[in-house]
Amino acid sequence: MEKKETVKKKTKKQVKTNSNKKQQAKKVTKKVEKDNKKKKIIHYIVEVIFIILILISVFKIFIWWKDNHKSKKILKETSKNVEVIKDESGEDTLKVDFASLKKQNSDTVAYLKVNGTNIDYPLVKTTNNEYYLFRSFDKTYNEAGWPFINFQNKLDGTDKNISIFGHARLDGSMFGTLKDTLNETWQSDENNFKVTFITENEESTYQVFSTYKIKVEDYYINADFISNNEFDKFIKTLKSRSNKDYGIEVSGEDQIITLSTCDINNDYRIVMHAKKVNWLFK
């Protein structure tokens, strides 16, 4: 009888143990299933995010292409109002039809050409420095923007420093080739140092005297100077920043033009300064 009782106890204990094992196995199975379900959800979310990022990238590329295509089309139209002619010395000069350009955009105030770059644009100016950051020459929204002049400049012949801004587009449009002025290849050709700036009242030639890259600031676009001495100190600072000594003397009595664009990461600006060396009033 004792043996039978012992066997029964062992059998009950074994049954209980087996039951516990089954319950534990079920818990493990449920946990695994739950973990797998979580992994599937996470995997699905990652896939959805990845697809969304791809769609956003494709959309941005399309917008970039669309804006560039539109800008090139507009530039083609504006170029019909600019004629390249030979002067008495045989050099190329520009004849700009401002009346026609103003019919396209009444904010047109000047024309700019920088030798050795793709910078060859009519310039606009309005009451602030934000409007043309994301508007084209026809005033419609465009991330390529359009080259514009600092609203603080008067363009009446009294400006000591005329500042001009434009986006650095990856395809080299707008001010995308201003970065080339920092390269040895560009700097090795003195013909590149000429900047042509034309308004309705004056045709001017500027000589490059400083090119550099600098952290974002607004010092170099200063338009107001108390005296020629203050401007002279300003000039010395600009010259000291240049990555090349252009050998051009600039004093507090001179007038200059400044071109500025963003570097790729937007933390830096690529800047060019040129001295007014020749001008003709119309």
Image: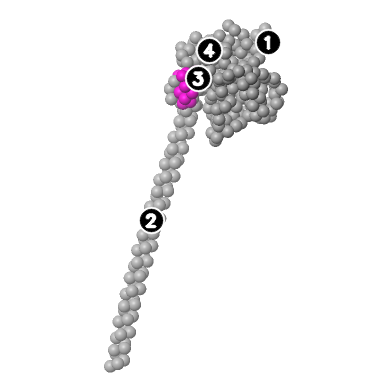
Q: Do the residues labelled 2 and 4 touch (CB within 8 Å)?
A: no
Q: Which residue is drawn at 65% across and 8% down?
A: 87
Q: Distance between the residues labelled 4 and 3?
A: 24 Å
**Which residue is label 3 attached to?**
151
Mark linked to residue 205: none
Label 2 Cα neighbours within 10 Å, binned few <14 / some 14-19 / many ≥20: few
**Which residue is label 4 attached to?**
81
| Residue 210 point in image, percent of width and height | 65, 25
> Which amino acid, by three-letter code, is at mark 4?
Asn
**Which residue is label 2 attached to?**
38
Label 4 Cα neighbours within 10 Å, binned few <14 / some 14-19 / many ≥20: some
What's drawn in magenta, residue-wise? 124-138
Q: Is residue 23 in the magenta section?
A: no
> Which amino acid, by three-letter code, is at mark 2?
Lys
Name the magenta segment's main secondary structure: loop
| Mark earlier in primary sequence (2, 4) | 2
